[in-house]
Each structure stands twice: as C-alpha cells, then as structure tokens.
Amino acid sequence: MCGIAGMIRRPDEVVDADSVHRMCQAIVHRGPDDEGVYARGAVGLGMRRLSIIDLSGGKQPIHNEDESIWIVFNGEIYNFAELRRELEERGHRFYTHSDTEVIVHLYEEHGADCVKKLRGMFAIALYDLKKDSLLLARDRLGKKPLHFALRDGRLYFGSEIKTILAVRPDLAEIDHEGLLQYFYFGYIPDPSTAFSSIRKLPAGHLMEFHNGEIKIRQYWNLPEYGTHPEISEEECLGELEKRLQEAVRIRLISDVPLGALLSGGVDSSIVVALMARESSKPVQTFSIGFREEKFNESEYARKVAERFGTDHHELVLDPDLEETVTYLSGMLEEPFGDSSMLPTYYVCRMARQQVTVALSGDGGDELFAGYDRYLTAMERRKFDPLQRLFGPVYRKGIHGLIPAGMYGKNLAWNVSLNERDRYLDSLSFFPALHRERNLFSAEFVKSAKTLPDPLGEWQRLYDDAPAKDRLSRLLYLDTKTYLNGDILAKVDRMSMATSLEVRVPMLDHEFVEWVTSLSIEWKFRAGTRKHILKKLAERVGIPPEVIHRKKQGFQLPLVEWMRNEVKQKFWSILLEPRTLQRGYFKPSAIKTLIDEHVQGRRDRSGLLWRMLILELWHRNFIEAGANWGATRSIPSMESREFRKFPAAESAVTH
C-alpha cells in the first residue's frame, strides 16, 4: 500500500527527480516507510510506501528483466501468488516477492488488459520505454484513487490532487461544474474534481498516454442484475457464506499486524465473525462511540466482540471539533460534505496504534439494499399515478408560489417527480437548478444554468442500468456513484491520513458479481433489507439484538454539536464578509438557515456543515495558493475516553 505520483513531460524535456520527490512529499502520510523515484528523460515515476508485503524487498519503482517496463503501484493484489506461479511457468524471472512485480510481467503477456486478471484494489502507473507509453489503471469499484492533469502536452498524475499541485500550483483553478455537483451530492463524482484542469480516472477504467494524447476506456462494469438461476434459500445461504469466507480469507495475507473496524452493524460484524474462523488468535477489533447515546453504537460492537472473543478497543469520541475539522479539511483537496469522515478518521487512527491493516464491512448496503432510502423509494411508488397526472403542473405553476421554508414544500416537489428523479431529488442537498434556487444568488443561478445538469449523468446511469426491476437500478446507480465517490473516497482518505490500510471483503469483485446476479428478492423481501445477509448473520452467530435493531449508520451528533460546542466559531466563518462575497448563496439565506438551526426550529446541520466545508476548502486550496501544503497540527487524542476489552479466556471456539 502506498501513494503514487509522476509526470511525463514533452519529448525534448527532462524530468527533474527533485520534482517527483516534491510530488511524493505531498503524500508522505500514505506511505511513511519509504520513497522511490524513477526519472529518465521525459518520464518520472514516484511512490511513497506503506510496507505490507515483502517488507525488505518490495521497494518501488519495480521493473522487468531488461528494465524496459517500470511501475509504481498503490494497492493489494490478492491473487498475486497464483499469478506469479503462472508467469514463472512461462519463463518470467522475479527479483522480489511483492505483488507489484506480478503486474509488470502480466503486462508483458497481456498489455493493458493485464488489469482484468487482477483481484484486489489498485491504482497503477506503468511506463513502457519501448512503446514510449504510460498506462494508468484504477480498480473496478474505485477503492484506490487516481488523478491526472494534461496541460501544455505534459501529463501529471497522483493518488491525491496534492501531488499535482505540488509541482503545478497554477492548476488550482476552480471547476464550477464540479462545485455544482458538490452542492447536489455533497461530494464531486468521477471524473470531475474541484479543479478545472484535474480529472479523476473513473473506477473500472484504464488510460493510455502516448504521443501527447490520452485514450480512456472502461475494462469492467457490473454485470446484469438478477440473472442467477432459481435456487433454494439454503443453497443461496451456503454459497453466500462460502464466497464471503473466501473474500475475507484472501484479505488476511499480510506481513504486518492486522485487525478489523467494527461498527456494531451487520456487515462489519459478519466480517469479524469470518475473520475469527480463520485466525488462530483473537482478532483485534476497533470501534468508536459517542457520549450522546442516540448516536452511540459501541454497545453493539462490544456484544459482537464478546461473542467472537476479540481483543477489542473502544474510543468514546468527544472531539475538539474545530481542531479536527481544520486538520481534515486541509487534508482533503476537494469539498467533501460527509461528516462521518470524522469518526472514520478517529477509528482509523486508533486502529493504527495497534495494526497496519484493517478489514471493514463497507459495501453491504449497496449490494444488499441496506439503506433507509430504498424503503422510502419503494414506499413512494404509491405516488406514481399522482405524479403522472399533476406533477408537471405543480412544478411549473405552484411550487414557486409556496413560501420558502414552509413545511412539506420539498416533499410536495419530490412526489411530483417520476420514480427516477424522485430518488435523485432525495439524494440532493442543494439542487440549485431545481427546487432550492431560493438559497442561491441570482448571479450563481444564472451561471449554473450554462453548465451541464448535475443530474444528467445519474439519470443516464439509472436508465442504462443492467437491471429490469426498479430497486436493482437504484443499487446499480449507488454502486457507480455514492459508493465510489463518497464511501470509498472517505475510507481511503481518512485511513491513509493515519497510514492505515483498509481492506473491504464485500467489495471483492468476484463476490460483487455473484451478489449482483441474485434476484432482488434475496436482498429486499417484504420490506426487509439485506434479507439473505441477515440470514447469514444468524448462521454465523451474530447476536440477534445486533441483527434486528434499527439501522443507524456511521453518524455524528452533528445537530447538537452545531447548536452548542462549535456554533460561535463556525457561524462566524459562514457570516464573514469573505465567505458571503463568494457569491454562491444569498447572505440572507445563510442567516436564515443558522437562525432556524440554532433556535431549534429546523435541523439545518447537514446543509450548514456542507457550507462550512466549502468555505474551508476555498481558504485552504484557493486563497492559500502555493502555501496550501503548510503543516497543520494533528488533532490531539489525549482527552478522549479509551477502553480496552482483552479477549476473554472463554472465547467462542471456531
């Protein structure tokens, strides 16, 4: 695991190794153990290493036998031993025991399509001297990030945008289309970024750069939903258990300490249960709790830890929010509005004190229909006839006449839409071109109308989804957007900020393809989400009170925090002239949102949080200019309440 970076200059130019070093220095947190740089002619490749496998011999960049192919790689390939044996039988010679070297020789055999044989998470940069071409590739589901920029015939790339800004600070130019997407979704989906010249390579895609030209193509997509032949529940359950057990087992390969992030939900609990089967000693587990009981899941995590005899660590979080937000907003080069990044950061930081690798339960909601919004979407099917009769009339002639802030106004807009757009509206925070124009300045709305509709790509994904039923289309849409752009981006950035590698068994692509093929009835049955996954939870021994409790998610007590602990500091930021002069929102609208929230009339914490994050991004990466990388103090953990629950001697035997 590491971070990668590099550049290809014009053919008549020479890359300075110091420039590649500067790119790598921007992501030391991703790989604190080592640095490697290859600079030859117009080509420079760099990496920062977090040593996981082949601790002494896996130094990158890595090359083939005649040094005509060089690679830097971020990720883990779980089938590398099998691939290595096949390659050795074909005459390839290896000089390391790392998974990285396998990719080099696979490329010699299969060219760019070598990525189709990789089982794991990865971002790859491979340079072929003989062809004078660069291959960039990203794993199928987007677990590892990869950014690039092409300017004046020169290509720059890196695991984080920071790497590119380290050598081209002039590329910190605002992409207004990306910010419009942030207003809608709370993050900026692939391939956009917050910077007009910098792009994300989409998940499941590869890019080839040759003779100054970029060619991008998709090499993987989710298969068609619901194609699996009819099977009994026992057959389905047995196959599910076998496949997920394998996905967990192959992710336990490591030369460093390994544990699990345990939230107390069904997904992570199953992962811990299957880890305990494979481990000869207690699994180390880590969870976060809050003093506010409404948001505290630590009790359930503790029950799972006790059931499977884990060596459990628990942190009751009462953070210095100002300190933490200041630090993390400086780590993120884009506005990112998911407030659960805070507990994710702290649980990763706690885990890193004991282990270098941790497994998580991410992905279960998108695979098995676990989100509350799926229930809402299915319940609101009853409005379909009403929408067809009155929807257009309401949106065009009535909605604008209803006073802003009136209860039920947004619901009325939502149910007036068709099934697809109703779901997209439910995901939108600041739909500036649709129902929430009154929050934005007239100038911004006028400008936004010249940009592509942020919902356009999402509508296309829904319409073209390889699925026949409505709910499977939503699962496909969320896997291609929210899972990639929010959940996995959050996990990658917060874990790498603490130099922790996180592995995600439920997003093993072979497992994902099998689950996708199952009928929707196995995932959502009679209003019960994750039907077959909960059956598996019962089978492996998860306590019933964990399986059948109300879904909570990794949430923060943001409402209370933004009314009490931090309100003065954060409100002052939002109301400062420099903030109001950005021109996005009407000053009166910001003041109204704050008043409604502070006085307890409405919960506006989510909207205000996203406004705050946007403003801090402006200050950190636009106003700061070349000083964006200034050192920031790491938040203290000294005042947090920490509990350790050693594995009991009477732990359950597997």
Image (spheres, helix red, strand yellow):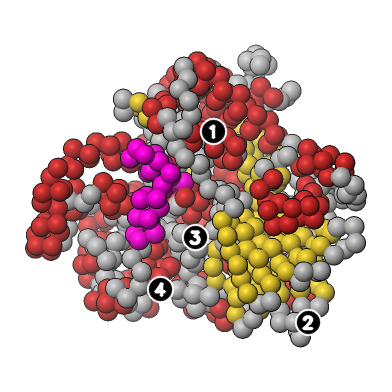
**Callouts 4 and 3 close, C-beta under 8 Å:** no
User: Viewer-proximal residue, 102 or 245?
Assistant: 102
Dot 2: few (<14), some (14–19), or many (≥20) neighbours within 10 Å? Answer: some
Dot 4 or dot 3, earlier in sequence: 4
Dot 2 or dot 1, earlier in sequence: 2
Dot 3 or dot 1, earlier in sequence: 3
- Image quadrant of residue 544? top left
Dot 4: few (<14), some (14–19), or many (≥20) neighbours within 10 Å? Answer: some
Residue located at (11% from left, 56% from top) = 394
Dominant secondary structure (helix, strand or loop) of the stretch shown in magenta:
helix
User: Viewer-proximal residue, 635 or 352?
Assistant: 352
Q: Give the residues drawn in magenta, as a range.
A: 455-479
Q: What amino acid is labelled 1 in the image?
A: Trp
Q: What amino acid is labelled 2 in the image?
A: Val
Q: Where does label 2 land, which residue?
A: 14
Dot 4 or dot 2, earlier in sequence: 2
- Image quadrant of residue 524? top left
Comparing labels 2 and 1, the label whose residue is closer to the camera? 1
Residue 111's place in the image compared with 318, above or below, is: below
Apparent side of residue 125 relative to residue 40 in the rendered image (left or right) = left
Tag shown at residue 190: 3
Residue located at (81% from left, 78% from top) = 41
- Asked whether the viewer can see residue 221, the reply is yes
Comparing labels 4 and 3, the label whose residue is closer to the camera? 3
**Callouts 1 and 4 close, C-beta under 8 Å:** no
Q: Where does label 1 land, which residue?
A: 514
